[in-house]
Structure formats: structure tokens, C-alpha cells
Image (spheres, rainbow, N blue to C red):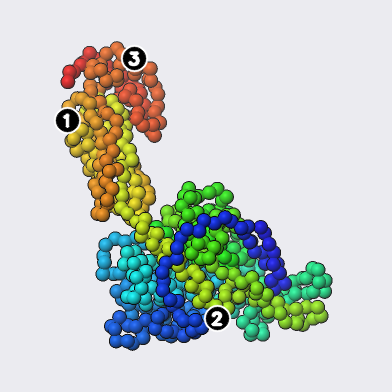
Amino acid sequence: MLCRRAVTGVMLVVLILCPLVLRLTAKSPDLGSPVLGSGSNSCQASICGKASNGKGVYALPPIDWEHYSNYTEIVTILLALNETYPDIVDVFSIGESWLNRDIYCVRLTNESDQKTKPEILFVGYHHAREPITAELSLYFAVYAATNYGTNQTVAEVVDKSEIYVIVALNVDGFELFEANDWQRKNARPTDEDFDAIDDEDPPEDEDEDGFIEQLIDYSNPSYPTFVRWEGIDNDGDAEYAEDWIGGVDLNRNYDYAWELGSSQRQSEIYKGPQPFSEPETQAIRDFVLEHDFTYAISFHSGVELILYPWGSTLAPPPDEARFIEVAQDLSSITGGTLYQQSSDFYLSYGVWDDWMYGVANVFALTCEIFYNETWEGVGEPGPHPNTVWEGGLKYWFNPFPESIETTILRWLPVFFYITNRTINEAFHNLAVERVQPQKTVIGKGYTLRLNVSLRNEGFFQEASNVTVYANSTIVQTQSITLSPRTSSIITFLWATADVANGNYIISAYAWPVPEEENTTDNNATGVHVFITIPGDMDADRDVDIYDIVMIAGRYGEVLPPVAWPQPPEDIDGDGDVDIYDVVVAAGNYGESWQP
């Protein structure tokens, strides 16, 4: 259902979903007591933790969870975690923003255990006006690090997986949001009013109340009219706030159906000049492609929903049943949050989760974690009769400071559910799907191509060897590396000059990888291959008039290269039946052999 709600004098369109029948089966993990006690607004032992030296010295700076952290405060906390818990925390930069701020990622894992572990990714703060998503991501990182030694749930996930948390992707956004609580996009310099000057006339908080307001004319109460944004006409063109700071919507800049997105620079969902044009999306792209993430979650706010691909088409994703199962479980552990395919909410192009799923092969979902239906914004008398200053989006998209932790604790189980699911599903498994020879009858002395289809059905990148056999004799061994849940076709060459005439069974065997428990599908047997005199088309061990007739029947035919197996009439395997094949058969006419 499409509903409209008057916010700050302009109709802010919010899509509210019709009720869904939910299957609530998941259970919230046992996380023990809340990280902070009720009403607490400063760092306590349960969240700050003690230094790992056991001396009782608090290693982290004070953390106020009734306060929205700025970039500097977040970085200070992350670096303190890195120093205090070096055995389980690794903090590093994945790249820089437009304003050269580092985009930090936290890795949480028991570093003393060097075995391969499944990887999970959580991402906060794509959009500047959604700082609650950074608070949630930061809270989890702190909670996991400080409770590792005392909480069994935390120990399980940290010991058995590698958890990566990008607390804030749009790191310039904190500063932009402080100046304009409507700000969504990044800080890319952009000329939105086409005067050849970038960002010269943004909204400004003239009354310093912390909100950007709009002047609304109520002369006709039935049809209130927008007059202008709060601010100063900085460029002297008699227009106000027509060239905001930035930018590009980072969640429209991914290279999946990007070309269908908005090219209007002034649009809130401007896709950017090209896919991955922004340093922030380039950083996360490169980081993701360096890893083998199984699941990933991106947090947003402005509505409360759980969304899964696709956003760019109404067609269901290939793994729809799996996505629905995960979404239902996330709904259960977050109090019955509605869930649906993203495109049922609205069509969106160039979005993170479509690219993660469609290109990076990661099961990616978006959690929209908060909106405040009671927030009406501020209201003050305007400068003219029947005018009112209205507005402020800050607390539509984010809880009031005193409720930050309440929202966080509702969504904290998502981290543990997704990580535990990844751990439970993680396994190593290579499977030989098919062995197919180029031909089933080949003249002795010619080289036969053999295609082996290999699939990595597990959740780790695997490097292995594949060996092809003719009966029990090794034909060839090749090495291959496969990403999780991908397939590849490997071509082997069998030189038959020194092979005896006869019938051979072709098989392929993938060498088991470490910790692979199911090896029953590592072997596959193909069809028989008959080696005989060149020109023996019908495999009856001689070259006679019947063979010549077969060649004549296909003479001049050009064979499609993808057609396997190919007919034996193309004796020399050059892709057509021509005079050279006739000459070979004629040269062996009358020849025969016995086993």
C-alpha cells in the first residue's frame, strides 16, 4: 500500500507494506544482559571491557550510547579495540572517501586458530542521514570484542568464523548530516543548479536548532505550498538551497542495472557519472572481491523492513526460497519485522545487494532498521502571514538519542543469526558434474579433447587437482582454483598415437581438498571412447564402403564448435567434413584390425 504523510510541508512518500503472513521459526541467540544497563549513558564495564592484560584498566574511551558518534569518535573507539584486543580484533582501512577519510573495517576472529573459516560481512551507513546504522554496527563490534571471554555465544561466532564489519561506508556523511539532516548522498562535488559552481548553495540551519526546515505557505490550507528551504541565497540568484553539498547516492552506484538509474544530478538517487565512480563504492567493491563472503547484510533506516534481491526487476531471484527462509528468521528475531523482495517495495537500480548477489555471488540482504512514525518535525512561525517553518528529518530516520540502545538491542541478534547460519552451512565440497569427450570414435594418432565440468559446491575458495583417466590409465592432471558455488569446464587433451586400439571408459577425479567430508561426488564416469583406424566411422574395426558413404553424407558440413560430441566424419577435427577427411579414409580403405 502506498501511503503519504505530510512531513515538513512537503509530501514525503513512504511505502508501507501490506501485512504478510510470517513464519516465525528462528530463535534469538542468548546474548545475556544488555550491553549497558537501563538508562545508562556512559561507558560501563560490560561494554568497555578490561584490557586483555587482566590488570583491570579500562582500555576503551568512554562510550555514550545516548549520543550519535561522529567520525572521529568512531575511529577512536575502533583503534582502541584494535590495541586492546589484538588476538581477536583487526582494524584496517579499505580505502578513502572523497574528503580523504579512511573507511575502516573491523575483522573479528580468533586469530590463534589459523584454519580456513567462513567469512561474513556487515555494512553500515551508506546514507548520511542514517547514523543509527553506524551506531548499530559499532555497538556489535564493541560488544563482540569486550564479551569474547565471558559470553559463550560471542565465543562461538568469533572462534568459528571471520566477521567483517564496515561500521560506516559514507564516512564524509557524518559532517554533512550535522549541517543538513536531509543529506543522503556522499560528498562528491556536484553542480546541481548548472551554474558551473559546485555545492555553493546548500540548505543552512539559520536558527541553529539542529534541523533544516522548509518554509510552507498555508494561505490555502487545503493545498499548502512549498516556498523555500531554510538557508541563505549564497550565489545571489534569488533561489535558496538549490545546490546541496554532494553528491552521489552510494546505493545507486553499483554496477548492476546501473544504467537504468537516475542521471539527474539533483536527484536524491543520482547514480553518479558511471558505475563505481565513487571512492567509497570502489573501496567496498575491491574489498568484497578479495574475499569469499557467504552472507552479507547492509543496514539502512527510514522504514522497518527486511529486503532481499532483486531490486531492479520484479522477477524472483534464483535462490528465492533460501532468501525467504533467511528473511523469515530475521523477522522472527527482530519482533516480526515485515520482509519482501526489494522490488516489491520499489524498483531500484545500481543497488548494493543486487551487485553482491548477482556479481559477487554473495547472499546479501538489506535491513531497514528504524523509522519514527510519531515524529512531526519542528514548527515555527514564518516571516510572512500564513507561513510556517516546518521540518527536520533527523528523528524520522533515527531514534531519539535516549532510545538509540533500544533500537540497537532489537537488531543485535541479526549479527549472531547470520554468522551462525554461515558457520552451520560452511563446508568444503568439490563435485565432478560431467565428463564429455569431443568424439566417441576417433582415429588412432589424433588428439582427443575431453571436457570436465567441475563445481565448487562449498563455501570456500578451493584449489585442487583434477585427473582424467582412460580406463585406469592417467590421461592428464590439471590444477584449478574455484570460487564458492561456481562451476568451470576444464579441457584435457588425450594424444592417442601410442594408445592401443579399443574401447575406453573415460572418467575424471577431483582430488579431495582439506576438510572435505563428502567425496562421493568427486568422481564421474563419461561415455565410452573407441580408438580405431582413421576412417572407421562406424567403429566396426575396418574401413569399408559404409564408412565412405557416411563421410559422403556429411561432406561439406561445417560443425558448430559447441556441438559435443562431434561426429566421427570430421576425422582431423578441424570443424568441417572436407576433402582432407576423404583422403584419410581413402588412404586406409580396406584396412582392418582385431582386438
Q: Nearer the viewer, residue 508 or 492?
A: 508
Viewer can see residue 193: yes
Left or right of 506 on screen, residue 20: right
Q: Which residue is mark 1?
A: 498
* SS state under label 1: loop
- Quadrant where the image shows the N terminus: bottom right
Instruction: From this view, report whether residue 95 is shown above or below residue 259.
Output: below
Type of the residue with mark 2: Glu
Q: Quadrant of residue 140?
A: bottom left
C-alpha span from label 1 to label 3: 29 Å
Q: Earlier in the sequence, mark 1 or mark 2?
A: 2
- Residue drawn at x 36%, y 76% is 147
- Residue drawn at x 32%, y 34% is 436
- Residue drawn at x 21%, y 30% is 496
Instruction: From this view, report whether residue 105 is shown above or below residue 24.
Output: below
* Mark number displayed over residue 549: 3
Q: Earlier in the sequence, mark 3 or mark 2?
A: 2
* SS state under label 3: helix
Pointers 1 and 3 in contact (C-beta within 8 Å): no
- Residue drawn at x 27%, y 29% is 528
Q: Nearer the viewer, residue 154 or 317?
A: 154
Type of the residue with mark 3: Val
C-alpha span from label 1 to label 2: 82 Å
Q: Which residue is mark 2?
A: 402
Q: Residues within 10 Å of mark 1 (few under 14, many from 20)?
A: few
- Quadrant where the image shows the C terminus: top left
Q: Earlier in the sequence, mark 1 or mark 3?
A: 1
